[in-house]
Each structure stands twice: as C-alpha cells, then as structure tokens.
Image: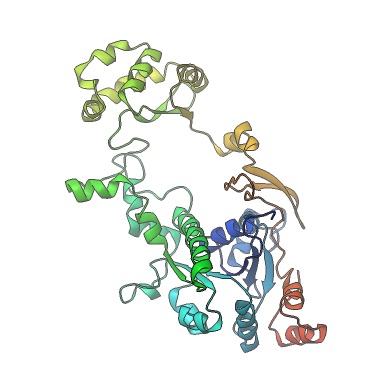
Amino acid sequence: MKRALEGIRVVDLSHVLAAPTCTMFLADLGAEVIHIEPPHGDDSREFGPFAGDHDKNRSGYFISLNRNKKSMVLNLKHQKGKEILRELIKVSDVLVENFRPTTMRKLGFGWKEIQEINPRLVYASISGFGQDTLPGYDTRPAYDMVAQGYSGIMSITGPEGGPPCRVGSSVGNIFAGHQAVIGIIAALFAREKTGRGQHHDGAMVDGLFCVLENAVARYTLEGTVPGPLGSAHPSITPFQGFETKDSWIITPIGNDSLWKTFCSVLERDDLTDDPRFATNPLRTEHKDELIPILAIELKKKTSQEWSDLFEAAGLPYSPINTMKDICEDPHISYRKMLVEIEQPRVGTMKIAGSPIHLSETPGEVYAPAPLLGEHTEEVLRTILSYTDDEIQELKDQGVINTTV
C-alpha cells in the first residue's frame, strides 16, 4: 500500500476553493479524485496569476488546488450527463460538492437520492450556512468574505481600535475544506462497521465560529465583546509583534519564567522587579504601560540580531516573514512544503506541498493538475466501460467535451 487512501474513488463536484481544498488532501493521500467540471471549466480556471497567457490550463490558482486529480467534463444540464453522474456515484466511495444547498436537490442528487443510488457513499457538502438551517439560509449565497463577517472572526481581526479586517487568506473556505476531510475519513471508518455512508453537512460559518478560541469564552463568561488587537493576545502579555530597527519580530512570552529570561536578554532586569509586571495577569492589566517600554527596547537592534539573542536564550520568537522570505526559507524546503511539479503547458513550477506527514503513507504531490477534460474519455472507458462509438455520440450531443 503506497498511499493511505488508495482504492477510494471520489466524485468531485467542487469549484473554486472550499471543496477543492478537501478533495486536494484526499488526492494527496492517494484517493482517485475525478473532478467533474462543466464545459466551461471550474470557475477558478479564470483566476490569476497565470503562467504566461490567460488560458484555462495556465491558472496558478487552479493548479495549486487541483494537483493529483483527474478532470472530466460533463454537462449536467443534459439528461445523459446526469445519467453518467449517477453511474459514477454507483461505483464510487465519496462525493464532494460545494454548491448552494438547493442546487444538488434540484439536480436530483440530494442526500435522500444519493442514499438510494449508493447507500455506501459518503456525501460531503460544503456551503456557507449549511444544509440543515433556519428557513432562508439554505438559499443564501455565501463567499468566504460573507462567512468571515457573519462568524465574527472579522470583528477580532485588524489593528487595535481599527475597522474589522478580513483575514489575509480565505480561511472560511480553507477551514471548511479541512474539516470536511476529517468528516469524510471518519465516515469511511464508520462505514467499515455499519456498511452505510453518511452525509457531512459542512458550513463555512460553523468552521470559523469553532476556531474563535477564547473570544467566545470571553463573551459567554464575562459578557465582554472582544475587538481587534492587531498582533497582540487578549490575555497574555507580551505576546505580539514589535517593530525592530529594520523590520518586525514576534515575541510570545507565555509564562513568568520566559518573562524573566526575556527581560535579561533585553538587559532590562529592572522590569522583573516592577510590581506592575510581576505576573502575566498584572502585565496584561498594565499592558498600556509595558508595551511602549518594550517597543523602545526592541527598536534598538535588527530582527536578525534579536533572533540570534532569542535563539541563544531559548525564547520563542519569529521574524514576520514576507512571501519571499517564507518561499525561500530552508526549513520550508526541508519539510517539502514547497515542491516542484511539471505542469503541462506551463513547465516547471512550484506549489505548496502536503502538510500531512504520515510516517508510512504521507500526503504528497505526485501528479500535476489536470488539463480541462483531460481524463473524460479515460473515465468513461475504464470505469464505466463506454465504447468509442458511445463516447463519440456523447461528444456529438454536447454531453461531454474532451478538448484540452
């Protein structure tokens, strides 16, 4: 067994980001992922940056999310397209989609219908507010920004005293995709005992709300409505970024022992004797007095100079890396988190690797992203046993498109 999910077939009806993130990790772990695209292709094929010409097969956005997958073009507006999808569902283990909740039901592929087609199938849906919702929420369109705003995460993101800010990456989509992977693998494990599939009803809002950490507890326990704090922590001090002579550095001082060491490195042992700063609760209470003192000290040296001193003292720290810094970082390279692929029509390019580091069956990037419709005929022939004449007829009817 070379990969953990070898033998698992996934019908991937995903588009753009949330569900493609989910199926990407399933593919990294060895599942056969058949990405079913409409004739015009996944919307993300039109998203930049592009490797050279603006072309559906040169989108860096699409390529970065769809490595290791197969692409099959199928027109689900055509009755025969729906029949082919039904045939695929019968011989697959997982179906993943991220349409609005009403879309799959209108197509005839809601959870009730799926159970009749293949009762062993694990069906994962990702939407903004979920399938099982209050009236009206199931028809409500949702992008990542909607989920970030609704969940509350934007209200605690950004500079202190500033307006709400979107998190820099589309975490609403991405967290929902990660959580769907957990649900799918758990459902596959349960299927070994019961013989039945399950429906994962994932919502971007749920996914973000559950990672709000102590912001929820601060409100439910204290009645406090948290606001943005920049890089600072609401209950640990100092635990934030500071400007240095040339850039920025993070200093998460999480306990009183680290505080004493930190003060020693700063050559400010007097701060440890100050009763205002003796314990973490006191430092947090008096942070408006403490942070300006530390800010002055940390601007006296460069980030590299502080890094060397903090490293020698065993303190937690990090420079605030730019994309250039992190993409050229030797640790990222060693962990195989930036890997090269040979992408058709593009050539050699680098994309993020898989973070699933299992000791025997790790996630890995072993194939490039597919060209649009690249595997349509292969799927029809090898999985569904269609003949050349039948495939040609499907082309003539506009059910499939194998042009790549």
Residue sitting nearer the eye, 354 or 80: 354
Nearer to us in this view, 42 or 8? 8
State whether residue 154 appears in this view.
yes
Which residue is rendered at x = 60% and y = 58% of the image?
24
- Looking at the figure, which quarter contains the N terminus? bottom right
In the picture, the quarter occupied by the C terminus is: bottom right
| Residue 319 locus on image (x, y percent) | 49, 29
**Residue found at the very far front of the displayed protein:** 193
From the top left corner, tell me how far across and down residue 196 is, in percent: 50, 74
Q: How many marks?
A: 0
Vertical placement of residue 226 versus 141, above or below: above
Q: Is residue 98 visible?
A: no
**Is 193 positioned to the left or the right of 227 in the image?**
right
Q: Residue at x 23, y 29 (%)?
A: 281
Front position in the image: 45 or 194: 194
Q: Is residue 24 above or below residue 217?
A: below
Residue in the foreground of this view, choosing between 29 and 64: 29
The colour scheme used to paint the residues is rainbow
Would you say 147 lies left or right of 256 here? right
337 left or right, relative to 227: right
Q: Quadrant of residue 42?
A: bottom right
- Report the residue at 60% width, 48% height from top: 354
Task: Point out residue 176 in the picture as x, y percentages from the top left corner.
Answer: 46, 59
Horizontal and vertical percent for residue 53? 72, 57
Of all residues, the one furthest to the right in this rendering is 388
